[in-house]
Amino acid sequence: MKILLVIATHGNEKIGLKVVKEIEKLHIDNLIVKIGNEKALKLNKRYIDQDLNRSFPGKRNGNYEERRAFELSPIIKSADLVIDIHSTTSNIKDTLIVSKLNKEMLEYIKSIQPKYVIIMEKSKNSLISQAKIGISFEYGKDNSIIALKKIVLDIKKLLNHFGLIKISLPKNKTSTKYFNVTSIVSKPKGYKLLNKIKNYTLVKKGTTYATNKNKKLLADENFYPVLFGEKNYKNYFGFKGKYIAKI
Ligand SMILES: [Zn+2]
């Protein structure tokens, strides 16, 4: 089984560098580590020309990220499991992002039992969309030691599940909430999100969620905010989530 661990898909998210140090101690055969956005990591920027996580499958003669995606695509496709490490400026906790949810993926997620799972089926240009099994980790802020420890623990749980390591690990008793991402919530110029809008907390149809002086943006349908508060999103607040289940 070939495992690919991708870190710094966004160059300013450095938590993956520390994750790698811990995972390499396990001496797993067939573990490949790749830095996603090398140039952006050196410059401590999210990206150079465009978001790498929206650039797949890439272009041979495209801009920097398109070329990088083009180089990485075959490596991602050939791996049996792709783990993609991110950090976030939003206040979400223990969130796994997957591009599809089938029976197998459900078993893998169950072996981890994170707090939240976001299914982004429509995101065809993401890194994990290229993978046979692709899981992105968004567990917390970049310098958070708690987030780091949890990512490492949960990767170990996954490796245990695949029989690649044999360590006795604490079981998570909490259940996992699943959300399907249905669309983007755009951020028109000058609008600010209201403080009461929280990730994974229902916004009811007709509720004001953002204002610009005395102008308001009202929810056109019930939705759960997902990945809201990410400072890196320029033109959108985050995504609309549809609650699926608690397992
Ligand atoms: Zn990221």
Image (cartoon, rainbow, N blue to C red):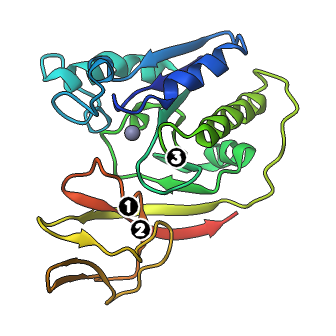
Q: Quadrant of the C terminus?
A: bottom right
**Callout 2–callout 1 Cβ contact below 8 Å:** yes
The kind of secondary structure element at disc 2 is strand
Query: Which disc number belongs to residue 53?
Result: none
| Distance (Cα) linking label 1 and label 3 | 13 Å
Q: Three-letter amino acid code at disc 2?
A: Pro
Label 2: how many residues lie within 10 Å, few (<14), some (14-19) or many (20+)?
many
Report x, y in % for residue 103: 65, 49
Label 3, on which residue? 140
Q: Tag 3 or tag 2, which sits nearer the N-term?
A: 3
Q: Is residue 23 left or right of 57 when viewed as pictured? A: right
Residue that label 1 marks: 228
Of residues 100 and 68, which is closer to you in this image?
A: 68
Image x and y of residue 64, in percent = 18, 21
Q: Is residue 235 left or right of residue 193?
A: left
Is 186 in front, or is 190?
190
Mark 1 or 3, nearer chain start: 3
Which residue does the numbered mark 2 point to in the structure image?
225
The answer, for residue 1, to whether it is visible in the render is no
Helix or strand or loop: what does disc 1 sit on?
loop
Camera-side mark, 2 or 3: 3
